[in-house]
Amino acid sequence: MDRSAIAKGAITEIWPDGMPRPGIPYSPAVRAGDWLFYSGQSASDLVSGLAEEAAVPGHFPYYESAMGKQAAYLYRRVAAITEAAGASPEQIVRVNQWYLAGMASPDYRTGDLTVNNRRYVETKNRYFQRLRPPSTGIGVRRLLVESALVEADFTARLAASGERPEPVSAPGLPKPAAGHAEGVRVGHWLFLSGDIATDWAGNWGQPGYEGELHALAPEARTNRLFWGDEPAARQTDYILKRLANVAEAAGTSLDHAVKAWVFLADPNDFAAVEDVWQRWFPDPGKAPARLIVPRVEIGARGCRVEIAMDLLMPEAAHLKSAVTGGWTPKSREPAAVRADDLIYFSGLMATDPAVGLAKEASLTPGLPYFGLAGKKQMAYILEKARRICAAAGADVRQIVKATLYFTDLNLYAGAMEAWRETFADSHKPAVTAVEIGGGLWVPGCGIMADFVLYDP
């Protein structure tokens, strides 16, 4: 790639030399000023399915690790993209992993652990030698590439001053077993790892009997002896306390959080999580933008919630403001939050507050084959995003990163038609798309979108 095309303030697609171009509106990564946002990467070039060199031969199925081979291919792609952008691995400040869980099995139950990510983590840790960035790992039902076991996306901060991200750790807190940083700070930004309610020991080998084996920290446990005992509430409070401790160690606080990602194993936990959220963020206008994803696999037994956050440092507090107008969420967060040169959206679905799934996003009753549900829902989501952008004085075509959660990946092709139309005359944002284990928050909605927009 010609790096002279990368200019401060510009939005530029990153295409390593020789990387095949798939037939979807896709960029491997997007450089936006000092930011680099990667699309979801897997063991595929998105042209021919799973790469031959990442596949385990069918006649020798047990001699090699499929996860290990796929991780090696994935990180070769990441290395090529990073180099083409003029960046380095140590400038990556967030990694999100989406693992293929066993949700498609009829025997799957919420709380099962079906992912073995050991060899992926080993490969990842070899790639990130100086700094292991904050990490989130979530189990999902399906990935875009058939037979793929993992997909990962990344965010890098390429500070103009040349400052490198530095790890942040809170004293006295149990450390993540996978070895990634609790947080990293660069300039006036702080990025916190996805956290769960574990002490990385659980009750294995402990005296006493609690009824079942689990990974929960003692402070996050509930005895389940009485009505009204809500494990998710206790876990959410524990996680937010941990994140607050890491933020404090970095010199900031959750008051300066600009985006939160919340993952729930069971959607029935939403009300309990929301009760705790209101105590921590009593003013929705000052709360971070928030995405809440249900029906995923959390990677420790007994853990029902995972939360990650991006924050500003106190000296940059004036760079945070809620975006009001265009849309008001039913849950307690603003539609979007402006943070320096980014606008973080809260999660968007094709909803109308009066009827649930919007009429404009629905297929005609009795004529289910006379339209593309994915296209109609994505078009409505993008129209909702346009209204929010108008309230912020921005353009929807400044979106640089989208993470799309589908209830059925058969909606993906239609959704990409609406996507292609919106970005026909601009860059193609970085995109990650995965399928969760069931329905979203509103019946009939098959897509939830998480957007980041660049507005220097």
Image (cartoon, rainbow, N blue to C red):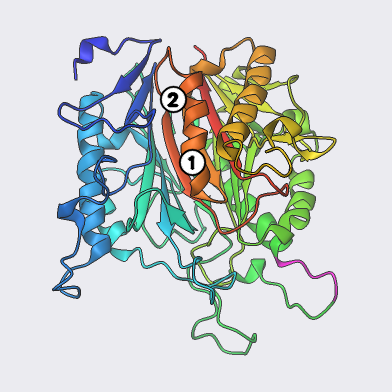
Residue 319 in the image: above or below residue 227: above
Query: Which quadrant is home to the N terminus?
Result: top left
Which residue is found at the position 75% from the left and 77% from the top?
224
State the image coordinates of residue 97 (x, y, percent, origin top left).
41, 50
Q: Out of 156 and 30, give the one closest to the viewer.
A: 30
In the displayed structure, 291 sits above or below 426; it is below
Helix, strand or loop at mark 2: loop
| Crowdedness near tag 1: few (<14), some (14–19) or many (≥20) residues, C-alpha within 10 Å | many
Which of the marked residues, 2 or 1, is nearer the chain's N terminus? 2
Amino acid bearing label 2: Gly
Q: Which residues are magenta?
A: 227-231
Q: Is residue 249 visible?
A: no
Q: Which residue is mark 2?
A: 187
Residue plotted at (71% across, 73% down): 222
Residue in the image at 64% along x and 54% along y:
439
Which residue was labeled with disc 1?
A: 412
